[in-house]
Amino acid sequence: MKTIRLECAQEAGRLLNEGKLVAFPTETVFGLGADATNDQAVLNLFAAKGRPADNPLIVHLADVHDWPQAAREMPETAIALLAHFAPGPLTVVVPKHPRISRWATAQLDSVGLRIPSCQQARQLITSAGKPVAAPSANRSGRPSCTTWRSTLEDLEGRVDAVLCHVAVDIGLESTVVDCRNAQPVLLRPGAISLSQLQGVVAEVIAVQRGLPTGSPAVSPGTKHPHYQPRAKVLLWDRRPESALPAEAEPRRTAICGIDLSDPMDDFMWSQSFTDW
């Protein structure tokens, strides 16, 4: 399969409507989209990522008022949180609508819903005319991609197209809150903090880390390993004498340093290595 590079969100949405897999930018990370109502498209997405079947996907909508397309009902806490944080990096777990593929939700009766704030993402979803299931656009377990080039590095030839826009400004997956019960539970931390959530719905609590053996994951990021780079990682507690270790390959090596003694100097040091 040859992965097509697209610049038109409407064209990308048309491909999604046809059952194709399309990687696209959001404000959090790049997502890999499939028609959430199409069983085969969703199964193809799992295969492209090498994603475990018990790891549910988040379903993306173009507008908060579109929730009946993917949810059977919307709890009051979910409505309150979405009214404050959507569009944006928030996912709410609610009862699933029957039209959403059971494979997209790991055969659970719940679904995570999100409305991205990225304009290109919302145009794509609107053009698709369907809810879009979209995990991060990377091979399962690998670091999430924040550019279309890094997306292609992971998924070239495994997906149908990538929407080549620069829109990511957070670089971290969405915050996930389970709103199905009277007390909402923060399942996965993200750009929206627990204190921010509690400022809107005071009852939100944080889940204890880890799941009991055999428990289903109702949110991605709570059961399987993530952020595993295929690279040698070196930790420095001081500025290195030279830019790179002697054995490093400059074109395949990145270094980021933290020097709390001089915040501005730290920033320049970190940035000076990003081209390597």
Image: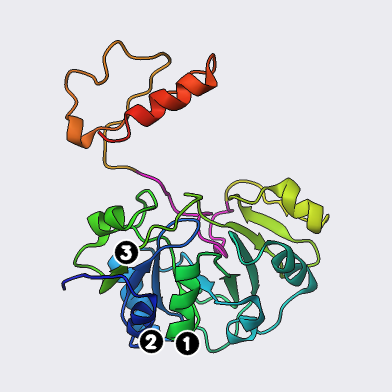
Q: Are marks 1 and 2 in contact (CB under 8 Å)?
A: yes
Left or right of residue 8: residue 251: left
Q: What's the distance in space between the residues labelled 3 and 2, CA to CA?
A: 19 Å
Mark 1, secondary structure of its residue: loop
- Reading the chain from its start, which is encountered first: label 1 or label 2? 2
Mark 3, secondary structure of its residue: loop
Q: Nearer the viewer, residue 167 or 125?
A: 167
Exactly how many numbered labels are in the figure? 3
Left or right of residue 155: residue 221: right
Q: What's the distance in space between the residues labelled 1 and 2, CA to CA?
A: 7 Å
Hey, what amino acid is under mark 1?
Gly
Hey, what amino acid is under mark 2?
Asn
Q: Which residue is mark 1?
A: 129
Quadrant assignment, res 63: bottom right
- Reading the chain from its start, which is encountered first: label 3 or label 2? 2
Hey, what amino acid is under mark 3?
Cys
Query: What label sits on residue 17 in the rendered view?
Result: 2
Residue 56 point in image, percent of width and height: 49, 68
**What residue is at 41 percent from the left and 69 percent from the top?**
53
Res 103 seen here: no
- Looking at the figure, which quarter contains the C terminus? top left
- Callout 2 crowding tier (Cα within 10 Å): few <14, some 14–19, many ≥20: many
Q: Which residue, as the protein is rendered here, is positioned at the far right? A: 202
- Callout 1 crowding tier (Cα within 10 Å): few <14, some 14–19, many ≥20: some
**What residue is at 37 percent from the left and 48 percent from the top?**
143
- Reading the chain from its start, which is encountered first: label 3 or label 1? 1
**Dot in front, 3 or 1:** 3
**What residue is at 16 percent from the left and 71 percent from the top?**
2
Position of residue 243 relative to residue 232, above or below, is above
Magenta segment range?
211-228
